[in-house]
Image (cartoon, rainbow, N blue to C red):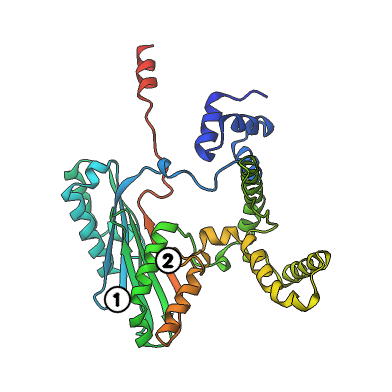
Amino acid sequence: MSVSAAQVKDLRAATDAPMMDCKKALVECDGDMAKATEWLKERGIAKAAKKADRVAAEGLVGLKLADDFSKATVIEINSETDFVAQNDGFKNLVLKTTEEVYNTNPTDVAGVMGTEFGTFFTETVAKIGEKIELRRFGTLEAEDDTIAMNAYVHSNNRIAVVIKAKCDSAKTAEGMRDTLKQVAMHASAMKPTTLSYKDFDAEFVESETKGRIEAIKKENEELARLGKTLKNVPTYVSMMQLTDAVMAQAEADIKADLAAQGKPEKIWDKIIPGSLARFVDDNTTLDKEQCLLDQTYVLDDKKTVAEAVETAAKAIGGTAQIVDFIRLEVGEGIEKVVDDFAAEVAAQMG
């Protein structure tokens, strides 16, 4: 069947895939946008997420952290333009809204806007003269003095992160604050979407598997062309899939490979643990991308975030484990509306 240029353009905007691949996908899927998107994803052509330059809602984040680190609130307020986001009136609105959410603990945006403060918010927006919205917010609190918390706002005031950890004692909780600030900075840069692979839905992991494997295969084609070392092509993408049976088979395969290489059995015990660790590393790419605890820590690439936190706690004689976090980035997930001025003029001239 034939597909229109508009359909191809829409699919490209949704997937960032090349034009010709978008056209082929639509032809193969009889013009069905959802099926075409899945077709591209299965072949590793569609991007896992839209490019940053397609996320365009402007605005600022706000953060309020208690002096004793017992509570933290983060909010996101969007504006239409960055010009307004830098306006003192807008900045003051963000500050006051953060205070309001921190003090009143509303459950949702409607719970803020349906109050006297909501009236103040609406009146302030009218004075600024641009569409402005409180998009979302979150608050974390320490249930007792064994909870450690800290937060970070990036210098552009567009990303805010709060990290919460459970410790063995109040002393450890106090000693872990600096580490949690560093973890918050890590999360700001590395964009985790969830705490652990245990939070994933099995269907989501399954849907991600084929496309991610195909993407690595395509990457290897380019690496081969450049004469560079190829990446190992995985079978899985998450620890969720690495059952006892899968790990037992992996160990059996490693032993068979060592035997085929003629390696003496007496040294296998020294080789197998490293080989199994490499197998896990190769087969958990989804976890390392999206799960905070499983990400490679930016300040020590020999450790995951979870391992780095454990090591830091041990150094001060205690234990600590991250149990929750919030990360807000301005405009995340909101697609930019791009005005084609030339086309608009041409249409009016016609």
Q: How many marks?
A: 2
Mark 1 vs 2, N-terminal side: 1
Question: What type is the residue that disc 2 sits on?
Answer: Leu
Q: Is 30 rendered above or below residue 298?
A: above
Residue under pointer 2: 299
| 189 horizontally vs 257: left or right | left
Asked if one can make out residue 285 in the rendered structure from this viewpoint, the answer is yes
| 129 horizontally vs 320: left or right | left
Residue under pointer 1: 69
Asked if one can make out residue 143 in the rendered structure from this viewpoint, the answer is no
Label 1: which secondary element: loop
Q: Residue furthest top?
A: 350
Dividing the picture into quadrants, the one containing residue 32 is: top right
Viewer-side label of 1, 2: 2
| Residue 287 image position (x, y, % from top left) | 56, 62
Q: Is 112 rendered above or below residue 225?
A: below
State the residue at coordinates (80%, 64%): 261
State the residue at coordinates (61%, 25%): 3
Label 2: which secondary element: loop
